[in-house]
Amino acid sequence: MSQIFTPIIEYLHAFSQTVPLPIFVTVGAAIEEIIAPIPSPLIMTLAGSLSASAGSHWLTLVYLAVIGSLAKTVASYVVYVVSDKAEDLVLGKFGKFVGVSHKDVEKMGSQLSGGWRDDLVMLALRAIPIIPTAPVSIISGLLKIKLTTFFWTTAVGYAIRNYFYLYLGATSIGALESLNEGLGSVEKIGYLIIFVLLVALAIFFYKQRQDDNIIAKLLKILHLK
C-alpha cells in the first residue's frame, strides 16, 4: 500500500474513536469509495469490530450496512459523473487518434444496459467482496450505464458487501489488522478480473464494429450494382 495514503488510514482509525459509529461509517465509506487505494474492507471491518466490542445487537450490523451502502452509492455516483465528463473531454479531443468516438462509447454502454442479465452482472460486481469498487464506478461512467441500473445494483450490492465485511470484523476482534491485510491481498485478484473483463469487452466490440463495417460495405456495393 502506498505510503501516501497511510496518514489517511491512520486518521480514519482515530476518527472512529471520536464520533458515533453511524457517522464514522457514513463518512468513512464515502472517503473509501472516492480514494480508491484505500482498501475497501477497512471501514466496514473496523466498524464491525467496534460494534461487537460495544456489545451491540446483530441488527446494528444490518443498519450499518445500509447506511454505509447509501454513502458509498452517493460517492460512487460522484466517481461516475467525473468519469463520464472525462470521457467526453478525452474522446472529444483525442478519439480520432485511437479510432474510438464518443458515439461508439455511448453505443457500447446502451448495449450493456438492456436487461436483467446486465443488471445481474452489475449487482455481482458490487456485491462480491474481492471485486474493487472504484473501477466499476469509473467504467460505469465511461460507458454511461443506465442510471436506474447503476443506482439499484450499487445500493443493493454494497449493502450485501458491507454486511459481509461488518460480520467478519465483528467476529475477528483481535485479528483485524491481519484480516484486512489478507482481504487486501485477495482484492488484487479482483483488479485482475476487472482487467480481463475489460480486455474481453474491448475485443468483443472491436469485432462487432468490424462486422458492421463489412456489412455496410456489402450494402454499398449491392446498392451501386
Image: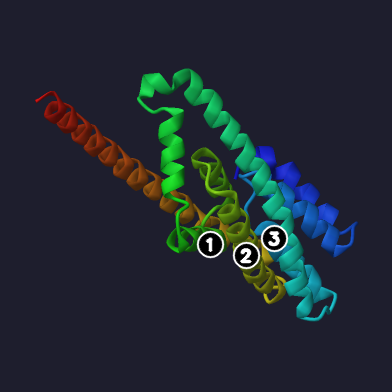
Disc 3, disc 2: CB below 8 Å? yes
Classify mark 3: helix, strand or loop: helix
Give the Cα separation between the discs numbered 1 and 2. 7 Å
- Determine whether 162 is above or below 39 in the image: below
* Front in this rendered view, residue 96 or 161: 96
Q: Residue at x 89, y 62 (%)?
A: 20
Q: CA distance from mark 3 to mark 2?
A: 8 Å
> Can residue 178 be seen at all in this image of the molecule?
no
Q: Earlier in the sequence, mark 3 or mark 1?
A: 3
Q: Is residue 225 left or right of residue 144?
A: left
Residue 161 point in image, percent of width and height: 61, 65
Q: Is residue 115 left or right of residue 159?
A: left
Which residue is tagged 1? 123
Q: If you read the primary sequence from the N terminus, does the residue marked by circle 1 or circle 2 appear first?
A: 1
First of labels 3, 2 by sequence position: 3
Q: CA distance from mark 3 to mark 1?
A: 13 Å
* Residue 151 visible in the shown view: yes
Q: Which residue is mark 2?
A: 156
Q: Which residue is mark 3?
A: 69
